[in-house]
Image (cartoon, rainbow, N blue to C red):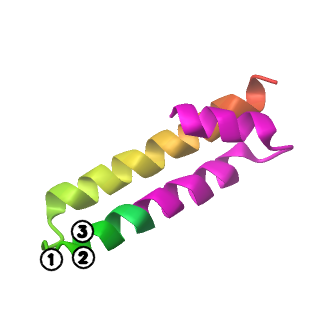
Amino acid sequence: LISGLILGKKATKKGYLEGIKLGAFIIVLFSLSTILIEQKLQLKLLLYDLIILTTAILGGMIGINKK
């Protein structure tokens, strides 16, 4: 959420898109690390990814309005 806020403050418009980009980047990093340590993708991990994406979007939307 905090990184979404910071990114949203730096964006000029459409904070939700910046949040989606940030959330997708973090999810890709976490997914790659999960695959590298040879764990199975589970429903629990997919739920965490959804939470990460949602908070990044919210952070971007709040950050764009806090200028």
- Dot label at residue 28: none
Q: Is residue 30 above or below residue 4?
A: below
Q: Residue at x 47, y 40 (%)?
A: 55
Task: State left or right for residue 59 relative to residue 32.
Answer: right
Main SS of residues in magenta: helix
Q: Disc 3 to disc 2, how far (Cα)?
A: 4 Å
The amino acid pointed to by label 3 is Thr
Q: Hey, which quadrant is residue 67 in on the image?
A: top right
Query: Which residue position is annotated with label 2?
Result: 35
* Element marked by disc 1: loop
Query: Which residue position is annotated with label 3?
Result: 34
The amino acid pointed to by label 1 is Glu
Q: Is residue 43 above or below residue 53?
A: below
Q: Hey, which quadrant is residue 64 in on the image?
A: top right
Q: Disc 2 to disc 1, how far (Cα)?
A: 5 Å
Local crowd size for mark 3, using a 10 Å CA cut-off: few (<14), some (14–19), many (≥20): some
Q: Nearer the viewer, residue 13 or 41?
A: 41
Task: State left or right for residue 3 relative to residue 63.
Answer: left
Q: Residue at x 50, y 34 (%)?
A: 1
Is 66 contained in the magenta span? no
The amino acid pointed to by label 2 is Ile
Query: Which residue position is annotated with label 1?
Result: 38
Local crowd size for mark 2, using a 10 Å CA cut-off: few (<14), some (14–19), many (≥20): few
Label 3–label 2 contact, CB within 8 A: yes
Q: Hey, which quadrant is residue 62 in on the image?
A: top right
Q: Residue at x 36, y 53 (%)?
A: 50
Label 2–label 1 contact, CB within 8 A: yes
> Percent x, y for residue 16?
65, 47
> Percent x, y for residue 30?
35, 62
Local crowd size for mark 1, using a 10 Å CA cut-off: few (<14), some (14–19), many (≥20): few
Q: Which range of residues does the magenta coloring cover?
A: 1-27
Farthest-out residue, right = 12
